[in-house]
Amino acid sequence: MLKRRGSHLLRAIVVGSIATALPVSAQTPAPAPAPPPHEHPADVPRPETTAAQHEHTVAASTLFPAREASGTAWLPDRTPMYGFHRQHGPWEVMLHGNTFVQYLNEGGEEHRRGHQAGSINWFMGMARRPLGRGQVGVRGMASLEPWTISGCGYPVLLATGEVCDGDSIHDRQHPHDLFMEAAVEYDRPLISSLRWRLYGGPVGEPALGPAAFPHRLSAMPNLVAPIAHHWLDATHITFGVVTASLYGSRWKGEASVFNGREPDERRTDFDLAPLDSYSGRIWLLPTDRLALQVSAGRLEEAEGRPGGGPREDVVRITSSATYHAAFGPGGFWATTVAWGANRETHEVTHAMTAETMATADGANTWFGRLEIAGKTAHDLHVHESDDVFTVGRVQGGYVRYLSARRGVQPGVGLSVSASLVPAALEARYGGRVVPGFGIFMTVRPAAHDMRSAAAPAIPDPHAGHVMPSTPVSPAAP
């Protein structure tokens, strides 16, 4: 019964997206208007004179639309890029990353609370080049967290998921694997404005859930993972995936086959297994500020059990909306609201995340996150119960980003949180409202937009992004 329901839901999503989109392309309407070019404020020097903030060489037409995020996920078209952009012969290269050096302290009862110093980090590189009528690309992503996060993870009350030291992880967020992505991709036009794409590799992200939290602009200044991670985007590190996409300028339908098993606690190897899980996802970008998605998938043997017991299958459904807006001379606001549901053998649980960040000048940045989740007694290590507990977490923080040097921008920040539990868990957590805090330093590439109003614009191959027709000179080293 579980397998039939998951299969019917997935088939409806994938077939529905293609069936509703193909007639649109067959009518050959006027193309959707391209997103308005981003303009540098009048009081900010042009890219040639701001080398520290614009460490890049922009080609006449980029192969990296602003909407692209983790795997094959999308963000709104109005998304600034934090990274390095280079042209090496026919190859266009992008480098991204985010690093925190932090101290986290979570309060509560002695078996739940924790404190830890460490480093949360990830680094990503992508390269693309034209090939015939299409383009080919390679992608890689890595993290040093197997060595910079000690034990089974960093302390985050109410975080759950995966297994470590023979037991399920609770009240901690597990570290990322060394290999977060190793994939190739091929993209080319089909007919008119319709395009198709293949993506896959030994490590990647299937078409399931919103863009992964490290890649969401609404979460970028926030150092910790959401407690709803395993209801939304936990498959962002999948050891074995193939995704096929069909898309236009404002929509995309995609389907994946992949290995849905969670990685084991050995964070430096490849946890390869059969590609026996599947998912489908529909994207809609009605404006350049908004990205909507709905997705579903069946994950075979996804959840590990303590002591090596039988693994649990999961049917996951997600939906999300991400909104980006620029304001003032240097302001930007990014917000994501996402919901997910996991159906396992004996219960269905739900989780919701609402997160936001805002900056008025690019230097002073505020962020926040509100979450509600239904977590099983097993997830929370409450062995004498079979209940599902509704828990919550509120977090907020501030980052002061300093002046960029050679395209790299450091910052210092503070985060405070309150974890909320029902009366039945009060004794186990030392109260119904449990405080926590974190202090950190961070380093990331400086921001730049890959669009400019300095020259007439030409469409890129994806018909949803605009580049200047005159290349910008390389920034000084």
Image: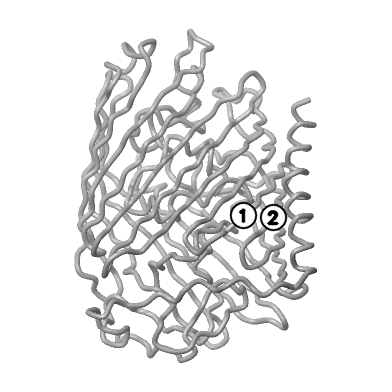
**Disc 2 to disc 1, C-alpha distance:** 9 Å
Q: Amino acid at mark 1?
A: Trp
Question: Which of the pair 388/271 is nearer the observer?
Answer: 388
Residue 298 location, x and y as percent? Answer: 69, 37
First in sequence: mark 2 or mark 1? 2
Residue at horizontal 43 percent and vertical 89 percent from the top? 455
Q: Which of pointers 2 and 1 indicates the residue nearer the eye?
A: 1
Question: Which of the pair 258/332 is nearer the observer?
Answer: 332
Asked if 45 appears above or below 379 in the picture, the reply is below
**Mark 2–mark 1 contact, CB under 8 Å?**
yes
Asked if 67 appears above or below 406 in the picture, the reply is above
Secondary element type, mark 2: strand
Rendered image: mark on residue 283: 1
Residue at horizontal 60 percent and vertical 54 percent from the top? 203
Residue 76 in the figure: left or right of residue 472:
right
Residue at horizontal 51 percent and vertical 33 percent from the top? 162
Residue at horizontal 72 percent and vertical 53 percent from the top? 17
Question: Which of the pair 271/395 is nearer the observer?
Answer: 395
* Disc 2: CA contacts within 10 A as few (<14), some (14-19) or many (>=20): many
Question: Which image quadrant for residue 329?
Answer: bottom left
Q: Amino acid at mark 2?
A: Glu
Quarter placement of the N terminus: top right
Residue 391 in the figure: left or right of residue 179:
left
Quarter placement of the C terminus: bottom left
Residue 111 location, x and y as percent? Answer: 32, 19
Residue 229 location, x and y as percent? Answer: 48, 39
Question: Which image quadrant for residue 278?
Answer: top right
Asked if 177 appears above or below 462 in the picture, the reply is above
* Disc 1: CA contacts within 10 A as few (<14), some (14-19) or many (>=20): many
Rendered image: mark on residue 142: none
Residue receiving disc 2: 254
